[in-house]
Amino acid sequence: MNSLGFDKLEKDTKVVVAMSGGVDSSVTAVMLKKQGYKVTGITLKLYNNSNVSKNKSCCAGVDIEDAKKVAIKHDIEHIVLDYQDKFFDGVINNFVDSYANGETPLPCVKCNETVKFSDLLNEAKKIGADALATGHYAIRKGSLNNASLHKAKDYSKDQSFFLFATLQEQLNYLRFPLGNYKKTEIRELAQKYQLDVSDKPDSQDICFVTSDSYRDLVKNLNPSVNKKGIIYDMDKNILGTHKGISNYTIGQRKGVGISGSKEALYVIDINKNQNSITLGTKEKLKKNVINFKNINWLGGNILPKGLDCSAKIRSTQEDLPGILDINSDHGTFTFKSELDKTSPGQACVFYKNDQLLGGGWITA
C-alpha cells in the first residue's frame, strides 16, 4: 500500500496535482514526484487581469508562470486549462448574487465546490488519474471508498472549513498530502527543492477582487444593487437612507452613514424584499441558534438529531460546543454560548473532535 492508499507501486500511480502557482501546491507536486508518483500538474486560468497583486492572486497570469517554472524544473508534466467561463459562472456570479440578496458570500468554498472539485476533478478522471491532490491543509483518512476529513496538524493553517461542501465521492478521490505538515515545514521543503516560490506570500482576501473594495465589482456586474432604501432602527423608526443593500454586511459598523446615536450602531438585518437595512446595538447581534440549508453531510449514513458536537461560522473561529439537529436538507445548530455577526450566505460547519462532519449554508 503506497502513501496515497493505493495497492500498487508509486510509479504505477497517476496523480493530478492542482498547481495554483503558490508554495503549497508547488511543494505538493514536487513532493509526490520525488516519492516516485506519476505526476501531472494542472493549473487553471480563472481570470485575466494584469492588475492582480501578487499577495492576493491565485491562478492569475503570474501564478500560471510560477507553476510552469516549478513543473519544468522538476520534470513534471504540466497542463493549463482555461476555466474563466466556469469560474465566472460558478464563483463570481454567485458572489455578486449573494450581495444583491443581502447575503455575505464564501467564494473560496464555492470555488472548491464547483471549479476545483467538480470540473477539475472530472478532468483528472478523464486523463486516467488515480487521484487529485491539492495543497490544502487538511487530513483525509480512510480507504478508497469511505474517506473522512479531519483538521490539519497545523491548526493555524487548517482549511477543512473551506472543504465542508466536498461530496463523499469527491473526498474518496481527493488527497491532501500537506495535512500532517506545519506551514514552516512546507517553506523549508520549498527551499530544499530550490523553488522560486519558496518565499511567495500566501494569497489573501478575495483573489478576484482587484480594486480596494468588493463593492466596485458588485456594482459593475449588477448596477441595480445600488438602489437606495430606508434604514430603520429596531423599533422600525426611520433613521436615514442607505446606498444599496450590497454595500452592507451583518455586523458592519463603519460606513453606515448614521451619526448622532448615543450608542454605536451595527447592521443587524438586511431585507432584500423591502430593500431596507436595520441597525441596532452590538447586543442585538448576539445569537446562539443558527438555521441552515443545503447540507453536505460527511458523518455517516444517519442524519443526526440532538448530536452533541461543535461548530463554527467563520474559518478563523474556534469551533464551539452545541447541539446539531438535521432534518433532510435543513437544520439547526444551537450553540451553548452566544455568537455575533452571523450572516445568511455564510456557512455553519460541524466537527466531532477533529473530524469534519459536514456543513450547511446559513439562512437565519
Image (cartoon, rainbow, N blue to C red):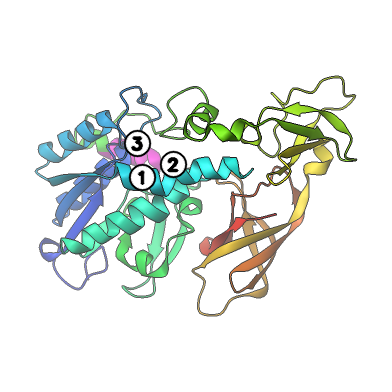
Q: What whole-number distance in Å separates the C-alpha atoms at marks 2 and 1?
A: 7 Å
Mark 2 or mark 1: which comes first in sequence? 1
Residue 126 horizontal/vertical position (percent): 18, 62
At label 2, which amino acid type do we have? Ile
- The magenta span reads 182-189
In which quadrant is the N terminus drawn?
Answer: bottom left
| Residue visible at 22% across and 29% down in the picture | 196
Residue under pointer 2? 92
Name the outermost residue toward the top: 260
Residue 2 horizontal/vertical position (percent): 21, 66
In which quadrant is the C terminus drawn?
Answer: bottom right
| Residue visible at 85% across and 36% down in the picture | 233
Residue under pointer 3? 58
Mark 3 or 2: in front is 2
Residue under pointer 1? 87
| Residue visible at 41% across and 55% down in the picture | 113
Give the prevailing secondary structure in the magenta stretch: helix
SS at badge 1: helix
At label 3, which amino acid type do we have? Cys
Q: Which quadrant of the view contains residue 167?
A: bottom left
Q: Which quadrant of the view contains residue 91?
A: top left
Q: What whole-number distance in Å separates the C-alpha atoms at marks 1 and 3?
A: 12 Å
Asked if one can make out residue 195 in the rendered structure from this viewpoint, the answer is no
Q: What whole-number distance in Å separates the C-alpha atoms at marks 3 and 2?
A: 14 Å
34 is within the stretch colored magenta: no
At label 1, which amino acid type do we have? Phe
Q: Is residue 305 above or below residue 278?
A: below
Q: Is residue 324 above or below residue 24?
A: below
SS at badge 3: loop
Judging depth in this view, the residue of 308 and 154 nearest the camera is 308
Mark 1 or mark 3: which comes first in sequence? 3
